[in-house]
Image (cartoon, rainbow, N blue to C red):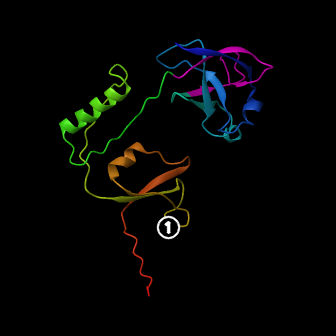
Amino acid sequence: MNTEKVVARRLTSEEVAELSHQDAIFVSASTEDLALDCYAPAFLVKPGKSFEGGSFTARTIFGEEVHVLPDNAEERGIRVADEAGEEIEVLQSAGVLLNLALFVPDGTKESLEALYNAAREAFGAGIVQRWSEEVVAVPDVKVDLFEEPARGRKSTNNQNRDRRALDIYPTRVRFMEPSAGWRFILEPHQETVDDIPTI
């Protein structure tokens, strides 16, 4: 387990409330399945001022969500790098886990195996592993993907919509996440027709 020593100061609830969701913080690295006596780099899920009582929610760089009560003496709380603090151990990343959705036109078992073998050859046989595999037939249809406010009223007015991606296959949407407070809207793809007369 690789860690590095960082000097960090513990924050109070009032100080956490002033943080944005882009401020780098440190929270306990322990998970439900694994107790670790160190911290993990993290970010608040939403700005601190948006929390109304209860615990603050942070997401570590390893994808774990942690609920923290900063003023609870029995918890490790939320820390931020500060020379006025104390030395803590911070868990380091050992690499990157890629969650890939591979689209293989007319894909066969042999072509998927060739992709896997190429990745193992590039990064090392002991490095690349298949954690899960799901083979899904992709329908030959394209969709337009929009985002709109999650609590928005249904209307024919599209001014609140944000076109995020074009010409995608429906299966890919399962591997995408909408922006906070927004939801996805799928519609059959409409080709853009330019009917402006040309000379």
- In this rendered view, identify the residue nearer to me: 42 or 102: 102
Q: Residue at x 28, y 58 (%)?
A: 141
Name the image quarter holding residue 117: top left
Q: Hey, which residue is sitting farthest bottom in the picture?
A: 199
Q: What amino acid is at disc 1?
A: Ser
Mark 1 burial class by Cα count in 10 Å: few <14, some 14-19, many 20+: few
Identity of the residue drawn at 36% across and 47% down? 172
Quadrant where the C terminus is found in the figure: bottom left
Image side of residue 120 versus residue 38, left or right: left
Residue that mark 1 sits on = 155
What is the tally of numbered marks visible in this picture?
1
Point 39% across, 48% down: residue: 173
Q: Is residue 1 above or below residue 197?
A: above
Query: Where residue 195 appears, x then y in whole percent?
Result: 41, 81
Q: Secondary structure at mark 1?
A: loop
Magenta span: 66-93
For this view, does 66 lie left or right of residue 95? Answer: right
Query: Does residue 75 belong to the magenta stretch?
Result: yes
Q: Is residue 12 shown above or below 30?
A: below
Q: Quadrant of residue 98?
A: top left
